[in-house]
Image (cartoon, rainbow, N blue to C red):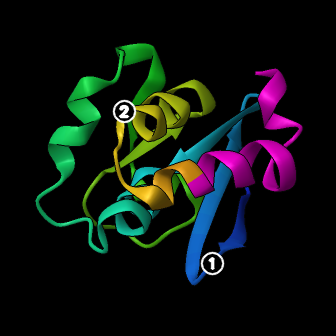
């Protein structure tokens, strides 16, 4: 069975999640686009995460058309990325995730 992706709106950005084996993961491309306005050239951001906080998956795994592999980020990994960022939008996103967007993810 293909994991189901869910889209959420944060300001003008789309944040997609996928639940795999009962764990919520965020699509890395959405997070980079939200923080930096693009996902091009910011892949090194993933390297700051622990291996347990990121995973590379085939696009087909989550029902997308074939193409480059995708990085997904755990809730803990997303929190780590956002807490390291000095961008104001990172602070706003952390608040949104905890208070409004994903209270069920906070338990993971």
What secondary structure prevails in the magenta region?
helix
Q: Secondary structure at mark 1?
A: loop
In the image: residue 59, left or right of residue 13: left
In the image: residue 21, left or right of residue 88: right
Q: Give the camera-side residue of 91 and 3.
A: 91
Q: Are marks 2 and 1 in contact (CB under 8 Å)?
A: no
Residue 23 colored in magenta in the image: no
Which residue is most to the bottom? 12
Res 23 quadrant in image? top right
Q: Is residue 46 above or below residue 30?
A: above
> Which mark identifies residue 60?
none
Identify which residue is drawn at 77% across, 42% down. 98
The residue that label 2 is drawn on is 84
Identify which residue is drawn at 46% across, 23% down. 53
Residue 97 colored in magenta in the image: yes
Q: Give the camera-side residue of 103 and 70.
A: 103
Find the magenta span and give its range. 92-108
Residue 72: x %, y % from top left? 46, 43
In the rendered structure, which disc, 2 or 1, sits on the residue that comes first in sequence?
Answer: 1
> Which mark identifies residue 11?
1
Q: Quadrant of the C terminus?
A: top right
Residue 17: x %, y % from top left? 65, 54
């Amino acid at each position: 069975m293909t994991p189901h992706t869910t889209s959420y709106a944060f300001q003008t950005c789309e944040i997609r999640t996928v639940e795999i084996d009962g764990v919520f993961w965020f699509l890395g491309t959405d997070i980079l686009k939200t923080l930096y306005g693009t996902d091009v050239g910011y892949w090194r951001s993933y390297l700051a995460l622990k291996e347990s906080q990121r995973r590379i998956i085939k696009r087909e795994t989550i029902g997308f058309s074939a193409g480059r592999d995708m990085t997904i980020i755990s809730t803990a990994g997303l929190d780590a990325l956002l807490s390291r960022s000095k961008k104001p939008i990172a602070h706003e996103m952390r608040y949104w995730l905890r208070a409004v967007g994903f209270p069920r993810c906070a338990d993971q």
